[in-house]
Amino acid sequence: MQPIVRRLDAYIKYRELNPNRFSEMLGYASPEKIYRLFREENAKPGVDILIDISNIFEDLNMQWVLTGKGEMLKKEAVSCPPGQQGGGPEVQEYLKCEEKERLIAAQQGHITALERLIEEKEKRVQEKDFIIQELRKKITPETTRGGPFKETGRRKAG
């Protein structure tokens, strides 16, 4: 396992997640991208995966993930209330809410992208429908004689 993957694994375990849940939080339809990292010996996460991780897990120090330098968590990531320096239930609940908000924001981004894709596809369908209509207008009995649309009952003189 590559050092970068070992660091991601350490973070996943720190967050008490598994690769499946981690993938869900990243907004992936399938956990295969993450499982591949742990399954294949020389696998490394691509830029897209690293960007997704950085966008969702804002407490994670990406310099640490990439290079191993520094601490796993950003220093400003968790400001615990007095008396809760160990990360009591209130802090854990706060982190869960923050995590949910980041996941919702990421999902909204995915939804917006999918809506744009649907609009593009609908425009292409309309263009194709227009072309089909125009081609149908051009089809006449004269243009189809002898072709796949020839009228039955008539034979070509030959």
Image (cartoon, rainbow, N blue to C red):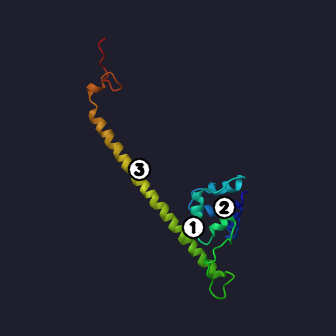
Quick one: 11 or 99, which is closer to the camera? 11
Quick one: 6 or 30, which is closer to the camera? 6
Dot label at residue 121: 3
Q: Is residue 141 left or right of residue 60?
A: left
**Image x and y of residue 3, in percent:** 72, 60
Mark 1 crowdedness (10 Å alpha carbons): few <14, some 14-19, many ≥20: many
| Real-space CA distance between mark 2 and mark 1, rounded to the nearest whole angstrom | 15 Å
| Real-space CA distance between mark 3 and mark 2, rounded to the nearest whole angstrom | 33 Å
First reached walking from the N terminus: tag 2 or tag 1? 2
Dot label at residue 56: 1
Q: Relative to residue 127, is residue 110 depicted above or below?
A: below
Q: Nearer the viewer, mark 2 or mark 1?
A: 1
Work out which quarter of the rendered image holds the C terminus and state it: top left
| Real-space CA distance between mark 3 and mark 1, rounded to the nearest whole angstrom | 29 Å
**Image x and y of residue 57, in percent:** 60, 69
Give residue 22's quadrant in the image: bottom right
Which amino acid does the dot numbered 3 rest on?
Answer: Lys
Mark 3 crowdedness (10 Å alpha carbons): few <14, some 14-19, many ≥20: few
- Name the residue located 55 percent from the left edge and 67 percent from the top edge: 103
Q: Is residue 127 left or right of residue 104?
A: left
- Name the residue located 69 percent from the left edge and 60 percent from the top edge: 5
First reached walking from the N terminus: tag 3 or tag 1? 1
Which amino acid does the dot numbered 2 rest on?
Answer: Pro
Work out which quarter of the rendered image holds the N terminus and state it: bottom right
Quick one: 124 or 89, which is closer to the camera? 124
- Residue occupied by mark 2: 19
